[in-house]
Amino acid sequence: MKEKDIKWKLPKHRQPVWKIFKFVFRPFFLVKNVQFLGEKFPEKCIIISNHNNKKGPMVYEFSLPISHATWGAYQMLGAYKMRFKYLRDVLYIQKNGLKKWKATLKAGIEAIFSIYTYRGMKVIPSFPDARLRRTMQYSMQCLDAGFAISLYPEDSNDGYFDEMKHFFPGFVMLSEQYFKKTGEDLPIFPMYYGRKKKKIVVGKPMYVQEFVKKGLNREEIVEQYRLAVNQLYYDHFQEK
């Protein structure tokens, strides 16, 4: 599917239909134990965290005390066929190891209504190619409109794990571009959700430009954030 077929528009703070959905499903996803190790979220910030399979983004949507837009697979904002193929082939078969018949059944059902969930969660299409510039543009529009940006930079091609081995650099690139545009060095909060403990821990904010001043390149900066997110896992969730 071509880029023009992916429909996205700036989300609104008021979403009456989504509020009804949240009222019905919030009890199943709400995590009441949200621990901040430092300051609370300002209105404008970037939040990076583990994805925790497909449940994580919904938990964050219902549990975090901040209005935020989130990066998500661009395929999930496309037509039904695109959503179905992504759910079946990538999420369920590649990342979760399900058998094809079971993945087909689950994807066939979920692809019907998933588009409404993604729009309600204010998902920004995350492109892996040259169209990433669109992701950046949409994200900066959301920041200017008063939405924080949350994203999941872990490499999940082989599945989701408690300890993350590699981060993609998109969030650092967003911070760099926003700083270039506005002069604001946005705080980036590392965060971790532990499903077994039903707990979210938010670390102290970290700033890209502070790392730049220390002489770190982009790859080294990304690694600092990966280590910070993993440290939350070691300190608060790893079984001793």
Image: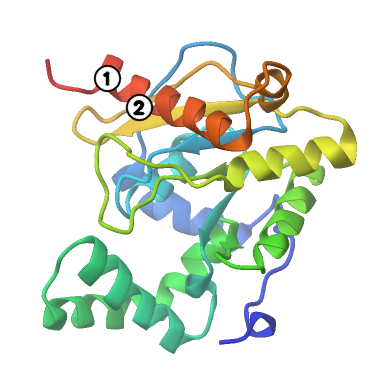
Residue 121, quarter of the rendered image? bottom right
Disc 1 crowd rating (10 Å Cα; few below 14, some 14-19, many 20+) is some
Q: Check the picture and name the quadrant holding the C terminus.
A: top left
Of residues 225 and 105, the one nearer the viewer is: 225
| Above or below, 125 relative to 193 | below
| Above or below, 76 relative to 30 | below
The residue identified by callout 1 is: 234
Q: Give the numbered dot on residue 174.
A: none
Q: Position of residue 40 (x, y in %)?
A: 59, 18
Residue 65 visible? The answer is no
Residue 236, quarter of the rendered image? top left
Q: What residue sits 67% from the left and 44% below the top? A: 173
In the displayed structure, does residue 20 sit left or right of residue 210? left
The residue identified by callout 2 is: 230
In the displayed structure, does residue 172 sit left or right of residue 97? right
In the displayed structure, does residue 221 sit left or right of residue 8? left
Of residues 129 and 194, the one nearer the viewer is: 129
